[in-house]
Amino acid sequence: MGLFSKSGSTAVAEPPVKLAGFSAPPVRPAKGAAPAPAIAKPQATPAAAAPAAQPYVAPSAPQVQVQAMAPQQERSPYFQQMKVRIHQNLVERLDVQNLKTLPPDIVRREVRVLIRELCQQEKGLLTSSDQERLMDEVMDETFGLGPLEILLKDPAISDILVNRFDRIYVEKKGRLELSEVTFRDNAHLRQIIDRIVALVGRRVDETSPMVDARLSDGSRVNAIIPPLALDGPAMSIRRFGSKPLMPEDLIRAGAFPAAVMDFLSAAVQARCNVLISGGTGSGKTTLLNCLSRYISADERVITIEDAAELQLQQPHVVRLETRPPNIEGKGEVSSRDLVKNCLRMRPDRVIIGECRSGETLDMLQAMNTGHEGSMTTIHANTPRDAITRLEVMIAMGGFDIPVKGLRTQIASAIQIIVQAQRLGGGKRKVTRVSEITGMEGENITMHDLFAFEQTGVDSNGGALGQFVCTGIRPKTGEKIEARGLKLPADLFQRRVIPSK
Ligand SMILES: Nc1ncnc2c1ncn2[C@@H]1O[C@H](COP(=O)(O)OP(=O)(O)OP(=O)(O)O)[C@@H](O)[C@H]1O
Ligand SMILES: [Mg+2]
C-alpha cells in the first residue's frame, strides 16, 4: 500500500503529458495506465465521479463560435466556466485528511495529476496550450492566490492595484497599466482577500472592513471591502520582490548618484539619525532598506512597522509589528506602544517603518537619548514640510509643548533628511539630501547638500535633469570623521554630478 493512499492505490508519478487537443482523449485512463492519484477520494464506481464525468454540455452557439476563432479574451467565459467546474470537481474529490499528512511538493504533484485527469474528462475544445494554462490556473486557485499568481510571477510588476474584481492595474517600470487579468466576480476576489489576510492571522469583515497584511514574499497588502469600498472589495499590493533593490540597483536606475550614497552610508555608519521624506510610493521604504544595510552587524536593531516590509540583512534584528483592534475594538497595539516597549529591549538603533502619529515624540526622544543612528520615514513633499509634519503629529498626539521647545527637540534629534520623489513618467529619485544644522531664534536651520534639478521632460514624459552638489560641507562631516570614516576629499565640492 502506498505511503499516503487512502484508496489503496500507490503514490504515482505524473503520467506522461498527453494533451487533449481538439479531439478529446478517453474520459478515464485505460486499464494498466497510471492509477488515480493517491490523494483523491476513493471512487466505488465510475458514477462516483459524477460531477466530473457528467456529459459535457456544449456552450451556446455564439460561445462555440468564439471558441473556434476568437482571440483569447473573448473565449474567456467558456474557459472560466470550465475552470470553475474543474476546481469544484477537484475540491469534491480531494481527500483533505490525507492531504494534511503529506509533504507539500507531493500534494502539488498529485493534485496536478488529478487536474489533468479532470481536464481530460472535459470533452471541451481545448488546445494543448489552453489545457496547460487551465491546469496552471486551477493549481493557482487551489494552492495560491488565483488570478494574482500570474501577476506575482512577473518581476517587472511593482504594484498590483485591484480597483474592482474586473479592473486590476499594475505598475511596470514606474507606469500604471490596466492588466488583462480579472477575478471571476466579487465573491472570488473576496475569497482571495480572505486567504491572504488569514495567512497573517487577521480577518476582514463588515465590522472591520480594512486590513493590512503581507504575502509570503514580503509584499505589503491592504484590502478594503464594502460598505467602505463602494464598488466591491479593493486591494493594493506593494511588491518588493524576493530580491530587494540594493543601493547599486538604485544608482544604476538613476535614483541618485554614487556620491549621494557615499555620504549617506557614512552618515548611517556614524550613527546620524535619518528621516526619509516622500510622497506615497516615492520609494521611502526602499531607501530605508538600503540605508539600513550600512548598520554594522554587531548593533542591536529593532524595527517597528504596521505591516513588516523591511528586509534587514543583519543578524541582530528584532522585528515588531503593530496589531489592529479585535472584533470588540480591544487589543490594539499601536506604534507608540511598540516604541515604548522597544526602549526596554536595549536597542542600539530603532527603525520605524513609517512615522504617522502618536509615536513621533517617543521616537524623537529615543533618537536624542542613546539610540543615535535611528531612522524612519514620513509622508511629506519637501524636507521643510517633513519638519512641519513632525510638529503637527506631535500636536495631534495631544502634547502641549511650546513651539520653540518642540523645534529644539526636532533639531537635535534629526541630522539628515532624505527627500524621495516619484517624478513625471514614473521615475523615482532622491531629489534632496538636507542637513539640519540647529536653531536660529524659533526656527530650525537647514541646508541642502545634494539636489536634483529638473530641467524638462523627455518624449515619454520622464523627468530630465541633473544632480548637483551644493558645495556645502556638512556639519555631520565632523561626526563622520570622528568615527574614523574617510570621505573622498572632493565629495562636497560644488558641481554638477555626472549621471552614471
Ligand atoms: N529608485 C527606484 N527605482 C525603481 N523602482 C523603485 C525605486 N524605488 C522604489 N521602487 C519601487 O517602487 C515601489 C514603491 O517603493 P516603496 O514601497 O519604497 O515606496 P514608499 O514611498 O515606501 O511607498 P508608501 O508610501 O506606499 O509606503 C516598490 O515596488 C519599489 O520596489
Ligand atoms: Mg513605505
Image: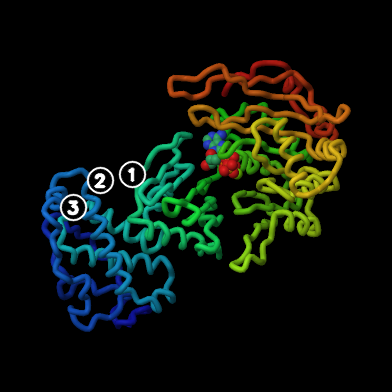
Q: Quadrant of residue 386?
A: top right
Instruction: Answer left or right for 98 relative to 73.
Output: right
Asked if residue 246 can be seen in this view, the reply is no
Residue at coordinates 31% horizontally, 64% vertically from top-left? 112
State if disc 1 and disc 3 touch (CB < 8 Å).
no
CA distance for labels 2 and 1: 8 Å
Does mark 3 have its CB less than 8 Å from ligand 1? Answer: no
Relative to 158, say whether 115 is above or below. Answer: below
Q: Tell me residue 283's x, y (percent).
A: 58, 38
In the image, 267 versus 368, the foreground residue is 368
Does mark 1 have its CB less than 8 Å from ligand 1? Answer: no
State if disc 1 and disc 2 touch (CB < 8 Å).
yes
State if disc 2 and disc 3 touch (CB < 8 Å).
no
In the image, 212 versus 314, the foreground residue is 212
Nearer-N-terminus badge (2/1): 2
Relative to 193, say whether 395 is above or below. Answer: above
CA distance for labels 3 and 1: 20 Å
Q: Tell me residue 439's x, y (percent).
A: 86, 30
Q: Regarding mark 1 in the picture, which secondary structure is present there?
A: loop
Which quadrant of the picture is home to ligand 2? top right
Q: Foreground mark, 3 or 2?
A: 2
User: How many C-alpha atoms fall within 10 Å of the one at disc 2: few (<14), some, or many (≥20)?
Assistant: few
Does mark 2 have its CB less than 8 Å from ligand 1? Answer: no
Quadrant housing the N terminus? bottom left
Name the residue that disc number 3 marks: 127
In the image, 417 versus 490, the foreground residue is 417
> What amino acid is labelled 1 in the image?
Glu
Q: Tell me residue 292's x, y (percent).
A: 68, 43
Q: Regarding mark 3 in the picture, which secondary structure is present there?
A: loop
- Give the numbered dot on residue 73: 2
Name the residue that disc number 1 marks: 180
